[in-house]
Image (tube, helix red, strand yellow):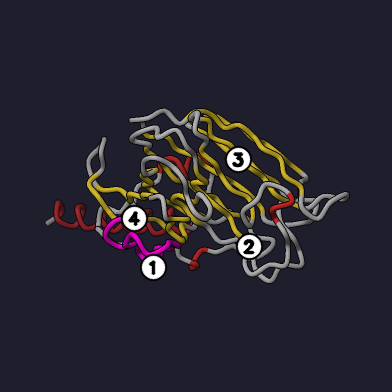
Amino acid sequence: MKTRHLGLLTAFCLLTSASMYAQKVALLYYNTFDEGDLKGSYRECHDKGCNDCETEKIVIKYDPDKAGKALYHTLWNCDERAELTVSHKGRAKIGDTRWYRVSYYWPTNRGVGAIIAQFPTYPTQRIFRQACGGVGTHIKLYGDGSVSFEFQRPTEEKDIACTKYVLGEMTTGTWHTVVIHVKWTQESDGFLEVWWDGMKKIDLKNQATFWRDEDKGPYFKVGAYKGDPWKGAEPFEIYTDDVYVFGENATYMDVMTFQP
């Protein structure tokens, strides 16, 4: 009887501890894709009618390099994008702090690049093509395998400024992980931290990161965006996996070690 009570007490403590931990780190969204669904996120595809979004361009497939499943994105010649718009449940308001984590696997270097993550502001009246393009801050994979964090934000001199930070290399046949910690604000307490494969590459403090006159904070997209239309001899393809969004009370170790 004592053993049974001890077991029940241990189970209760573990459940309570897990609940307190979940509250502490404020996990707002996650998907490992192992369950085979998108968990409130949705496919976003723009095309010219030659490929189907749900069966060809954005599909859940068995992971090419580890146990489980991952999300597979393909851009064909007539496609503009094959992205997953992450559930708006964790979408930041202006002034909020967020942690983001996502992993990538690039099976083959086709010699062309694509934007692989975006923090768009929409709707907006701003003309982002004057800076980095797109509709907000984004991560871009170039044809040579280099990965750039392209940071768009307001400054005292310009409504939209662009700074490109090289994060590292996307080697084919290897999983890579990016972690982003940011406060979305135009106030002086804004900041941005970015890690690539465990190494901190960006550390900005007292930095405007967003626009106070936008109606909402940015949402979050992962996948592949090339523009209209994508041009290339062969399709561009990439996998994404382990997509997480945390609130402000998490730490880097929480984000990197969390297991659902």
Callout 1: SS = loop
Q: Residue at horizontal 84%, vertical 51%?
A: 158
Q: Residue at horizontal 70%, vertical 55%?
A: 128
Please say whether residue 249 is visible from this viewpoint.
Answer: no
**Which mark sits nearer the N-terminus, 1 or 4?**
1
Extreme residue toward the left, this view:
1
Callout 4: SS = helix
- Seen in the picture, residue 159 relative to 88 is either above or below; the reply is above
Q: Which residue is mark 1?
A: 40
Disc marking residue 57: 4
Which mark is nearer the camera, 4 or 2? 4
- Seen in the picture, residue 26 relative to 242 is either above or below; the reply is below
Q: Amino acid at mark 2?
A: Thr
Which mark is nearer the camera, 1 or 2? 2
Residues packed near mark 2 inside 10 Å, few (<14), some (14 to 19) or many (20 plus): many
Q: Residue at horizontal 21%, vertical 53%?
A: 6
C-alpha distance separating marks 4 and 2: 24 Å
**Which mark sits nearer the N-terminus, 3 or 4?**
4
Callout 2: SS = loop
Callout 3: SS = strand
Label 1–label 4 contact, CB within 8 A: no
Q: Is residue 74 left or right of residue 122?
A: left
Disc marking residue 149: 3
